[in-house]
Amino acid sequence: MARLSKPMISFIVPAYNEEHELSGTLAAIRQAASGAEQHYEIIVVDDASTDATPKIASDAGAKVIAIDRRQIAASRNAGARAAQGQYLFFIDGDTRINQVHVSEGIAALEDRYAGAAHEWRWTDLFPFGDACSCAGFRRFISP
C-alpha cells in the first residue's frame, strides 16, 4: 500500500462465489490505486460464499469480512462500516477498474459530487429485458 499524505481510499468489494474473477479484480484495484498514488485499503465482504472467495481475498492481502445475508446492499453496508478511508469506492467482484477511474472519481468527490457510474458491454447473450431495465441507469453524478 502506498503511504502518502492524500486522503485514504477504501475499496469495498461485495463478493459471493467470485473465485474465478476476484483475483483479477483485486489486481486491477491495486494497480489503479498505486498508479493514482493514494493510500488505500481493500475490503472484501464475503457473503456466505461456498467457494474459495474468502481465501483468494485473504491471500491477496485484502481485509475479509464475513456476513451471511445474501444481499449486496448488506455486503456494501458491512464494508462501509469497516472502512477507514475518507473515500469509499464500491467495486463489484467481477469488475476491472483503472487509474483513470480512481483519479477522476477522487476529483469528483473533492469537487463535492457524489455519484455512481456503470458501463455495459452489450452481447447477444445479454437478455433484452435486462438491457431495457439497465438502459436508464447509465451514469449519475450530482453536486
Image (cartoon, grey):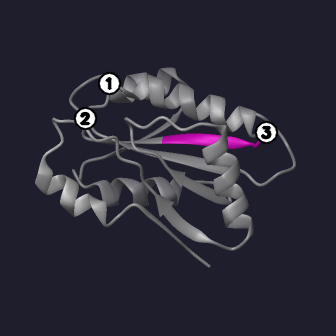
- In the rendered structure, the answer to whether residue 18 lies left or right of residue 142 reads left
Task: Name the amino acid type tagged 3.
Answer: Glu
Q: Nearer the viewer, mark 1 or mark 2?
A: 1
Residue 123: image location, x then y, percent: 24, 36
Residue 48 place in picture, x, y as percent: 24, 40
Seen in the picture, residue 114 relative to 123 is either above or below; the reply is: below
Please give the residue where the numbered disc 3 appears in the rendered image.
37
Let me know if residue 85 appears in the view. no
**Residue 130 place in picture, x, y as percent:** 17, 54
Q: Which residue is nearer to you in this view: 130 or 39?
A: 130
Q: Quadrant of the C terminus?
A: bottom right
Q: Give the side of residue 16 with respect to residue 66, left or right.
A: left
Circle 3 Cα neighbour tier, 10 Å, few/some/many (<14 / 14–19 / ≥20):
some
What crowding class fits label 2: few (fewer than 14 Cα within 10 Å), some (14-19), or many (20 or more)?
A: some
Could you tell me if the residues under marks 1 and 2 are in contact, i.e. CB atoms within 8 Å?
yes
Q: Which mark is residue 49?
A: 2
Of callouts 3 and 2, the N-terminal one: 3
| Quadrant including the N terminus | top right
The region drawn magenta spans 37-43
Q: Secondary structure at mark 1?
A: loop
Q: Secondary structure at mark 3?
A: loop
Please report the residue visible at 15 percent of the width from the left and 35 percent of the height from the top.
125
Determine whether, in the image, residue 55 is placed left or right of residue 98: left
Type of the residue with mark 1: Glu
Residue named by callout 1: 19
Is tag 1's residue or tag 2's residue first in the polypeptide sequence? 1
Q: Amino acid at mark 2?
A: Ser
Query: Is 5 colored magenta in this rendering?
Result: no
Against 95, residue 73 (above or below) is below
State whether residue 29 appears in this view. Answer: yes
Q: CA distance from mark 1 to mark 2?
A: 9 Å
Q: Is residue 113 above or below residue 106?
A: below
